[in-house]
Amino acid sequence: MKQLLILSGKGGTGKTTMAGAFIKLASARVYADCDVDAPNLHLVLKQWSEPKRTDYYGMPKASIDADLCSECDLCRQNCRFEAIKDDYRVDFFACEGCGVCEAICPVRAVSLIPAVAGELMLYRNDHVFSTAQLKMGSGTSGMLVTEVKKQMKSVVLYTDLAIIDGSPGIGCPVIASLSGVDMVLIVAEPSVSGISDMERIVKTAQQFQTRIAVCVNKYDTNLVKTQEIESFCHQAGLPLVGHIPYDPEVIIAVNEGRSIADRDCIAGQAVREVFCRTISTLLQDN
Amino acid sequence: MKIAVLSGKGGTGKTLLSVSLAAVAGKSTYIDCDVEEPNGHLFFKPADIESEKIAIRIPAVDQQLCNGCRVCTDFCKFNALAYIRDELLIFEEVCHSCGGCVLLCPLHALSERDKVIGEIRRGVSGDVKVISGILNIGEASGIPVVKRLLHDIPAGNTFIDCPPGSACIVMESIKDADYCIFVAEPTLFGVHNLNMVYELVKIFGKPHGVVLNKCLPGGNPAEEYCRDKGIKVLGKIPFDQDLGIMNSNALIAAREDEGWREIFKTLLQNVMEEVHHEAAVDPKR
Amino acid sequence: MIIAIPVDDQSSENKVCVSFGRAPYFLIYDTENGSKSIIHNSAASSQGGAGIKAAQTVVDSRAEAILTPRCGENAAEVINAAGIKIFKTISDSISENINAFKEGKLESLDNIHPGFHGRGDQ
């Protein structure tokens, strides 16, 4: 099974819109939303059944037993994450579960307890859709991304292609989402910010030796910048798999909870072309 | 006053709004906390840049002193240490810099050294102090950079451009803010993600309002959401092709065009009234 | 020679586990006398750095060779530091791999996948 991951660096360039359309066009039976911080794919691909929900436990968090605590202050002084408050209570959001407080406490008042950091959801019909939602303020999203992908692959389905919607940025969750994928499609946006972010995500993906293809979304909003993206791809030897014009129909489709692949519009047409080229690039031997 | 601009979803216009507000606020400070993809400096093109490297503390071992007791390897919850063939191996990129191994080593064979993970650039653009955090590529967490960014903020009005999402780096970015502005686009995606940051900001009890961006004629799911939840709408920015082009060329519309300057000035006025109103209602803050 | 193989369960019909760092158990097999034992991999449930800890466990078991389908960068660094050779498995069958190893038919695992900050497990 080939895995295609859709990324962008910058947020709001159209990752999820693209992923939703690709899933429709490929009639993909296996897909996942790895943007665990702000998952949206389920909004485009309405599911008719209830998912199987599983709590996701991140790093355990420290807990101080007030009855045992002698207020010696050692834990507070040695916590690098400022997670121990003046009244010797643990700030759950700040605690990273390193265990320094537990190790240093002379009266064994500290213990590490399991903490739910998010929720995994698995939809299973004739297709498999794996997604998750990180709890607000949680920090261990990379592991949750790994769990989403693991959950996606836990159901054995005979199929050729899995499509994965990624998250913005270049940090922990993005790095985790890159693991094991066959190719990354970067959705670039023709703006100074979009290009700067694209360059950073390209470098990140290259660091992990992942194959890359690029498409330009809303290309006609700034033709000069679109050209810059084209020459960047040319110089970096990255295949450019197409251009999608700005199309107000996209917002209408999103707000109706539908994919642009379902609409007869210029953006939908362009996405179909991008899809074909992406898939043939993916299937080429590298 | 410290005003944080956040959105949940990426690409809704956080940078546009925070840059524009800072640009029309006279003497002010703009801080870019979106350290994974910092873009504010592309708009401000600041001059007189001073750079500060941001480092985290990573353990280093004196193999001569280490006797292989494995207290550190057993302790490390992140499995950043291994003891192989009479040598302690340290895996920097797995380390969370908790300092536990150094603290617990009975032979004091471990010490700490700096590992650079990013930098902060401080410059000026007109009246605006521009401070950007930049995380190095391949690094997992930008939180140390954000902590340093917000450590000593100059007095006066400060606009904090937050990272997208609602994870702990966003919490870190709004921790000391006096007021939070959500930027929302008129899509269901926008609403879904707005809901998440709204919940986050409520946990912290921060006063807040919303700016609706990319507004088109017709229904706006984000506006309906605000009405339902009783969230104050501070202003609306229409969808506009000229603004889009200026923005995509990293030009600050409020500096380029008198019309946009007025629009953002009015918006800033609304924001400031609301900020001071909230501060008066709850003097604790 | 003592070899270690990541395996899915403790039973006698166990198969080679697709992951090294997060394999629940390791089979330790002595090619001299055919003795087998199973050791628990406490790294399997780790939040991060599972490969490093799993490799430490295998090194401590005094294995001299590891037979695995995949291995991450961090685990490989630990294993290499210990002077242990890594061989690529040819199927999910334990006995097939052991026999192939004895006959010198297994190739060394060269395709070490990059470390994903300890999040690279599949």
Image: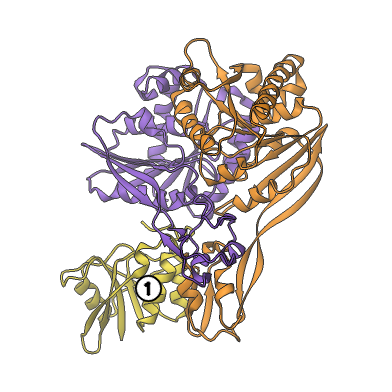
Chain colours: A purple, B orange, C yellow
Q: Quadrant of residue C12?
A: bottom left
Instruction: Give the farthest residue toward the bottom.
Output: C32
Please tell me which residue is depicted at 68% across the width and 51% down the height of the picture.
B148
Residue A193 lies left or right of residue B195; in this view the side is right
Which residue lies under the disc numbered 1?
C108
Depth order, front residue of A240/A193: A193
| Residue B186 position in % (x across, y down) | 50, 20
Q: Is residue B46 above or below residue C14?
A: above
Q: Amino acid at mark 1?
A: Ser
Question: How far across and down, in percent of the image, does residue C60 sit?
Answer: 38, 81
Q: Secondary structure at mark 1?
A: loop
Pinpoint the chain carrying mark 1: C
Whether residue A1 is visible here, answered yes or no, is no
Query: Residue at 62% across / 64% down in the picture?
Result: A77
State the image coordinates of residue A152 (x, y, percent, origin top left): 31, 46
* In the foreground, B126 or A99: A99
